[in-house]
Image: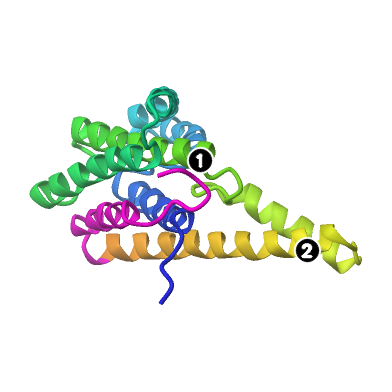
């Protein structure tokens, strides 16, 4: 059986982590961090818990992406692999969260410091994933944000419907197939993340770590390892 591609596995993990983080950490988006602008406003308006992690998510995300890029450039200049070392750091962050979740148990809103540390660790892991995906898999659909992907799918479908000819038709058809698979992988991740939270809210954090570990053994096609 053919193994899934690395970008596809990243899409699954993106959906899973974002959904599980949202449910377990008082509405924190750990992958789609700009969504925290909305949830931060709602938190302030309603007086609910979790305002600080939502406020810090974007700057933390930006800093980690910046540092990931610097690390990648340094590795490239030394003719060393880039993708796997960065994804290994992501795995370590997810594994640390999983180990702590198993030890600690489900997180509760009153544990503000715990929620902050766990949330920023997950944000950092997803920032590394986004940086690697953007820099080394530029032709693959985004792994954590499906709005642009679904928009492109609809644009391509419209082009095919009105009969765009030649190379554009072939490119659009191939792009639709690739993007639909990515959306499905992300959606499956979201569904399983929600199911994991319902069934085992602490043990559910094992899945992202295991998925990240599996990704280390996949061939990063289209990129250097």
* Residue 16 is a magenta residue: no
Residue depicted at 20% across the width and 46% down the height: 95
Residue depicted at 31% across the width and 41% down the height: 90
**Residue hosting label 1:** 136
**Nearest to the observer: residue 117 or residue 207:** 207
* Left or right position of 88 against 111: right
- Where in the figure is residue 35, as x and y percent of width and height? 50, 39
Label 2 crowd bin: few (<14), some (14–19), many (20+), radius 10 Å: few
Task: Please state, as top left, top right, bottom left or bottom right, where the N terminus lies in the image.
Answer: bottom left
Mark 1: which secondary structure?
A: helix
Label 1 crowd bin: few (<14), some (14–19), many (20+), radius 10 Å: some
* Residue 223 is a magenta residue: yes
- Where in the figure is residue 43, as x and y percent of width and height? 41, 34
**Nearest to the observer: residue 193 or residue 77:** 77
Residue 162 to residue 99: above or below = below
Quarter-wise, where is residue 84 in the image?
Answer: top left
Residue depicted at 50% across the width and 49% down the height: 143
Residue depicted at 42% across the width and 22% down the height: 70
**Nearest to the observer: residue 139 or residue 15:** 139
Quarter-wise, where is residue 132 in the image?
Answer: top left
- Where in the figure is residue 54, as x and y percent of width and height? 39, 32
Residue 65 to residue 11: above or below = above
**Residue hosting label 2:** 170
Label disc, if present, on residue 197 of the rendered structure: none
Q: CA distance from mark 1 to mark 2?
A: 24 Å
Q: Which residues are magenta?
A: 199-225
* Left or right position of 72 against 99: right
* Left or right position of 140 against 77: right
Task: Please state, as top left, top right, bottom left or bottom right, where the C terminus lies in the image.
Answer: top left
**Nearest to the observer: residue 136 or residue 176:** 136
Mark 2: which secondary structure?
A: helix
């Amino acid at each position: 059986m053919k193994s899934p591609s690395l970008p596809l596995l990243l899409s699954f993990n993106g959906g899973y982590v974002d959904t599980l983080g949202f449910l377990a950490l008082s509405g924190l988006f750990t992958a789609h961090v700009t969504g925290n602008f909305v949830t931060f406003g709602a938190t302030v308006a309603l007086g609910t818990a979790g305002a600080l992690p939502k406020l810090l998510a974007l700057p933390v995300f930006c800093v980690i992406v910046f540092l990931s890029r610097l690390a990648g450039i340094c590795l490239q200049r030394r003719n060393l692999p880039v993708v796997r070392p960065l994804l290994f750091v992501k795995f370590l962050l997810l594994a640390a969260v999983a180990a702590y979740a198993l030890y600690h148990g489900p997180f509760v809103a009153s544990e503000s410091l715990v929620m902050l540390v766990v949330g920023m660790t997950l944000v950092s892991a997803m920032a590394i994933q986004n940086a690697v995906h953007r820099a080394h898999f530029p032709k693959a659909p985004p792994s954590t944000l499906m709005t642009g992907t679904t928009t492109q799918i609809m644009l391509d479908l419209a082009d095919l419907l009105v009969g765009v000819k030649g190379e554009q038709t072939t490119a659009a058809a191939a792009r639709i197939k690739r993007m639909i698979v990515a959306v499905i992988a992300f959606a499956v991740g979201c569904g399983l993340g929600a199911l994991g939270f319902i069934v085992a809210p602490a043990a559910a954090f094992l899945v992202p770590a295991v998925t990240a570990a599996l990704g280390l053994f996949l061939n990063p096609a289209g990129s250097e390892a």
